[in-house]
Amino acid sequence: MVTWLADALLPQTGGRLPSEGVRVLGRPVPADAAAPDAVLRQLRATGLDRNSIVYAPTGTATQPQGGLPSDGLGECVLTVGRDRFQVQWQGRAADVVEGARVTVTGELFVVPDYEWEAFELPDTRADWTVRDVTRPVPYGDVWVDLVGAEGPVPA
């Protein structure tokens, strides 16, 4: 599931989301050699709150870059099978080596439309099918369970 900003037009179960990007907020760490390229769901705690569900995608990191020097953020693209995700973490781009296999544990968010041009993000947008919409959740957000248009994303 990804967090959808509630002020945007909300998707409907069974609908399609064309050309949306997904961001993982979490620090990339070297992947276990036996870990397959996959997106695994993990529960942190019980209950339906902002921090209860996180994901741990494992794949290949490319295009590491730093944000503004003042923000202290590192960014890269994570390729997991046919899916590509934006990754953002507190740290430096040098924390990730181009082509390294990494796992990133964190929350998933839809990338706001304005960020693609404003921050010159590598284009990782894809078409998604909405499997489920959970609302309301705390903080005014909505959780959306997405499946890649050609197959499942979360395992």
Image (tube, grey):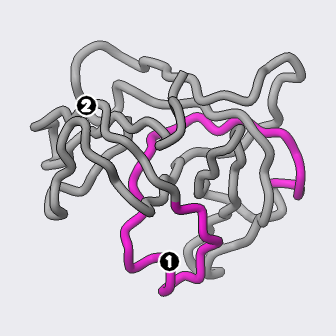
Residue 112 falls inside the magenta stretch: yes
Q: Which tag is nearer the camera, tag 1 or tag 2?
A: 2
Q: Residue at x 22, y 23 (%)?
A: 48
Q: Earlier in the sequence, mark 1 or mark 2?
A: 1
How far across and down, in percent of the image, does residue 81 sit? 71, 38
Residue 95 falls inside the magenta stretch: no
Judging by the rendered image, the residue that carries numbered circle 1 is: 116
How far across and down, in percent of the image, does residue 56 sit? 59, 30
Please, which residue is most extreme toward the front here?
150
Foreground residue among 135 and 131: 131
Q: Which mark is residue 39?
A: none
Whether residue 126 sits left or right of residue 36 in the image: it is left
Q: Is residue 89 visible?
A: no
Quarter of the image with the N terminus is top left
Residue 128, above or below 56: below
In the picture, residue 95 is in which quadrant? bottom right
Q: Given the image, on which type of amino acid does mark 2 rest?
A: Asp
Please, which residue is most extreme toward the bottom here?
118
Part of the protein shown in magenta: 96-125
Foreground residue among 152 and 26: 152
How many other residues sit within 10 Å of disc 2, few (<14), some (14-19) or many (≥20)? some
How many other residues sit within 10 Å of disc 1, few (<14), some (14-19) or many (≥20)? some
Whether residue 123 sits left or right of residue 108 in the image: it is right
Q: Is residue 5 visible?
A: yes
Judging by the rendered image, the residue that carries numbered circle 2 is: 132
